[in-house]
Amino acid sequence: MSKVIVLTGAGGVLCSTLAKALAKEGHKIAVLDLRIEAAIKVADEINADGGVAIGVEANVLEKDSLVAAKLVINEKLGACDILVNGAGGNHPLGTTSNPFLEVADLENTTEGFKTFFDLDPNGIEFTFNLNFIGTLLPTQVFATDMVGKKGCSVLNISSMNAFTPLTKIPAYSGAKAAVSNFTQWLAVHFSKVGIRVNALAPGFFLTDQNRTLLTNADGSLTPRGNTIIEQTPMGRYGEPEDLISTTLWLCDDASSFVTGVVVPIDGGFSAFSGV
Ligand code: NAD
């Protein structure tokens, strides 16, 4: 059955792939993004391929902007059945320069060098807001369409670092842990009104967000990029397409008794102790 599916951050790498895959299943797609030109480009590609999609500008941190987007979506596509909370990311001000603190680091005066003690609360707050508040607000706005209906669900995007924090990115790790925790909380809270709530926990995918951390200008892997491959038993980065089958399953009535789960899609990263 065709559903109306709203995806936030769908002008980006991972969620544009999910939007296109969901459109191929016959669903009507609202591509939401802060970058309207990116949202429209994805919607145009879906429509050119025979699907039904609209690109809508929305800021997941501003409720008014989400309410305005919902009005457009309701008018053009109908009531929302499924919400994919894809907008998210990290901020450099919430990131340390080194994985481990060394005594000598306190004397390091190199410009831009950051220890734990230099982390900027604004960078931490930005990251917590984007990932957590940016999941909560769209759910408050779009799940009002779903209450008491059949076949509705919310799909959040968590991360590997929610299970075990990654070095250097305490804000992003903590914020994604909050997304996983919220996924469980909301699954319970919505259990009586027919809305299932689940999450994907992608492992490592080379996207614009992390490309400079993981690859050099010539395309070869940085030391951090190599460490990730060594810690991933399947020995490769994920491709955006690796997220499609789990997304289709969790958005479909085939998973009608599944709620509150966070599914790792990580080539075995979270199962591997490193030894
Ligand atoms: P991306 O940067 O390609 O896409 C994110 C999109 O969100 C962008 O199009 C951006 O414009 C949009 N966005 C940013 N702030 C917004 C706001 N305030 N309101 C609305 N839209 C906003 O990133 P991606 O790699 O496709 O990541 C998608 C999701 O997957 C994110 O939640 C990310 O944290 C998560 N994730 C990514 C990886 C990875 O390896 N790339 C791994 C685990 C989880």
Image (tube, helix red, strand yellow):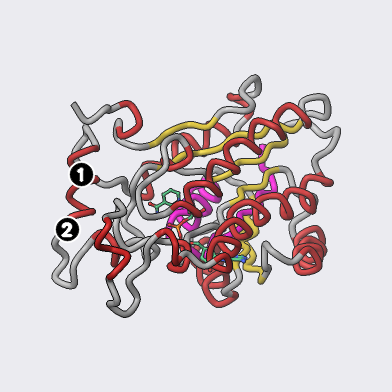
Which quadrant is home to the N terminus? top right
Q: Is residue 132 found left or right of 165 in the rendered image?
A: right
CB under 8 Å between discs 2 and 1: yes
Give the labeled residue for mark 1. Answer: 229
The secondary structure type at the circle numbered 2 is loop
The stretch drawn in magenta includes residue 80 = no
Q: Crowdedness of circle 2 by 10 Å Cα count: few (<14), some, many (20+)?
A: some
Crowdedness of circle 1 by 10 Å Cα count: few (<14), some, many (20+)?
some
Residue 221, which numbered label? 2
- Is the shortest distance between ligand 1 and the CB of mark 1 under 8 Å? no
Q: Which mark is residue 148?
A: none
Residue 48 seen anywhere in this rendered image of the structure: no
Q: Is residue 11 magenta?
A: yes
Q: Position of residue 152 (x, y in %)?
A: 72, 36
Name the quadrant containing residue 36. bottom right
Estimate the spatial distance between the alpha carbons at disc 2 and disc 1, rounded to whole Å: 9 Å
Give the magenta part as a residue range. 1-24
For the point 53% across and 32% down, which residue is it? 262
Image: 15 above or below 155: below
Query: Residue extending furthest top?
Result: 257
Q: Could you tell me residue 74's position as x and y percent?
A: 80, 58
Q: Label 2 amino acid?
A: Leu
Relative to 245, 51 lies left or right: right
Q: Residue at x 57, y 28 (%)?
A: 261
Q: Where in the figure is residue 255, as x and y percent of width and height? A: 59, 24
254 lies above or below 89 = above
